[in-house]
Image: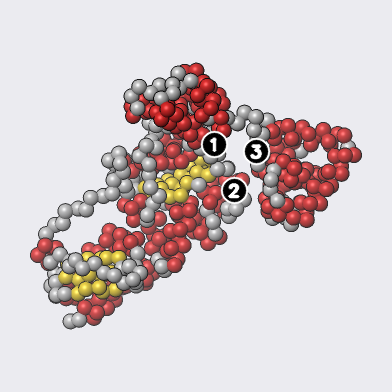
Amino acid sequence: MRAGAIWERVGRRLRAELGEDVFSSWFKSIEIDLAETDAVRLSVPTRFLKSWIDHHYKDRIIARWSEEAGQPVAIEVIVRTAAGARTVSRPRPVEEAARPAAPAPAPQRHDGTHLSAAQNTLGGSPLDPRLTFETFVQGRSNTLARAAALQVAQSRPSDAVLFNPLYIHAGVGLGKTHLLQAVAGTAQAGGRRVLYLTAEKFTFGFVAALKNQTAIAFKEALRNIDLLIIDDLQFLQGKQTQAEFCHTLNALIDAGRQIVVAGDRPPSDLENLDERVRSRLAGGLTVEIGALDENLRFDILKQKLAHARAQHPGFDVPPTVMSYVAKNVTQNGRDLDGAFNRLIATNRLTNQPVTIEMAERSIRDLVRIAEPKRVKIEDIQKIVAQHYNVSRSDILSSRRTATVVRPRQIAMYLAKTMTLRSLPEIGRRFGGRDHTTVLHAVRKIEGLVGQDPALSEEVEALKRRLND
């Protein structure tokens, strides 16, 4: 019997056994690449399909093909390239295929722990083995976030899910990605099926699945993991992608699977996200990592010094210099990294001892004591809402009562005078309003401030709060 006829009969049996949706997702794009009496090579368009078929359906295909052919058959699945190139290796002969095959080594992290099948199959974002709980420096601003993350990471699959989803938010360089990767590494080492993705990677994977007509397969794979970790959620784009993310959240939470998410703002402040996604995230535990205080910055530098000494014997930074850097480099952990790396480079390349004077020269552009604070529109909305005893949602709403209109106009005025945002951008951040509405509000408050001393003082007080 011809290989094409055998595959057609195998396909009919698989469709009957697995259902039309599953068959269309996994088997419709399979082509016969090579067929001999005892060996068959099938090709698929993507690495994702190959990996999933190898892990879940290959034994079933071998069994059905062997039954239809009337003899044992070895089957190999390959990925066909865009140019149609094929590998020339022949599948193992039947005699070899009949013997138990040695398991293929799983991909490994540099620290020796195995990557989960989900992380490998779905093309998860890479993990940095240096980002562990042991290397995460704890301080007052991150104690709760670290404790919640550690609880999630050390949970067993049979344990009840306590914080779901766990949402961690912080500004740039404050450690949220470090915590998420620590959760992924610890949970994988404990044998759980973990998938760590950036929002960009999630979007790319879903769009690629739509393009390759494997969306159902993509969804099925996502729903078969124990722990889903999404970083930089603020970059999740597209209504269809956000809808799929929401469905994934619902499916995993309803199934008792753990979700950990990180973003640069609280869920309620992510205006670009679908309201259903924000509501789902807010229903779990939301934890903020605050700014690094001086003591924490000093402890981070001490840890860096210990690592540097191991790599550069004889290198040292006096405590006075450490204190100077911790006091003056205040933005985030990445600036601390840059400052410390400059001290090492200057010392190693010029043989200059590390002194206060050398540090002042090396990191002067990172010292931002006199730099004015960058005010965010979200902060303006929050502080104005608190001052006038209304909610932020009221300011963003279409309500036209006097108790809401005046605070809204003041917030728009402050957004125009204290940020670099354009009128259209401000309008979008205030509930999708037209730029002419913002311009009217700015002119209105400008006129009132010049006429009403009490309102002028209120506006100045709001500006001081925003700049503190």
**Nearer to us in this view, 72 or 279:** 72
The kind of residue on which mark 3 rests is Arg
The kind of residue on which mark 2 rests is Leu
In the rendered image, the quadrant that contains the C terminus is top right
Q: How much space separates mark 1 and mark 3, taking CA atoms?
A: 19 Å
Give the image quarter of residue 121. Answer: bottom left
Q: How much space separates mark 1 and mark 2, taking CA atoms?
A: 14 Å
- List the residue tagged with mark 3: 374
- Name which residue lies at 74% across and 45% down: 416
Q: Secondary structure at mark 3?
A: loop
Instruction: Give the mark, 1 or 3, whose residue is nearer the N terminus.
Output: 1
Which residue in the rendered view is the most extreme toward the left?
Answer: 95
Q: Position of residue 245 (x, y in %)?
A: 49, 55
What is the crowding at mark 2: few (fewer than 14 residues within 10 Å), some, or many (at least 20)? some
Q: Position of residue 343 (x, y in %)?
A: 46, 28
Q: Secondary structure at mark 2?
A: loop
Q: Is residue 60 visible?
A: no
Residue 270: assigned label = 2
Residue 288: assigned label = 1
Position of 223 with respect to 53 (left or right) is right
Q: Is residue 260 visible?
A: yes
- Name which residue lies at 38% across and 23% down: 315
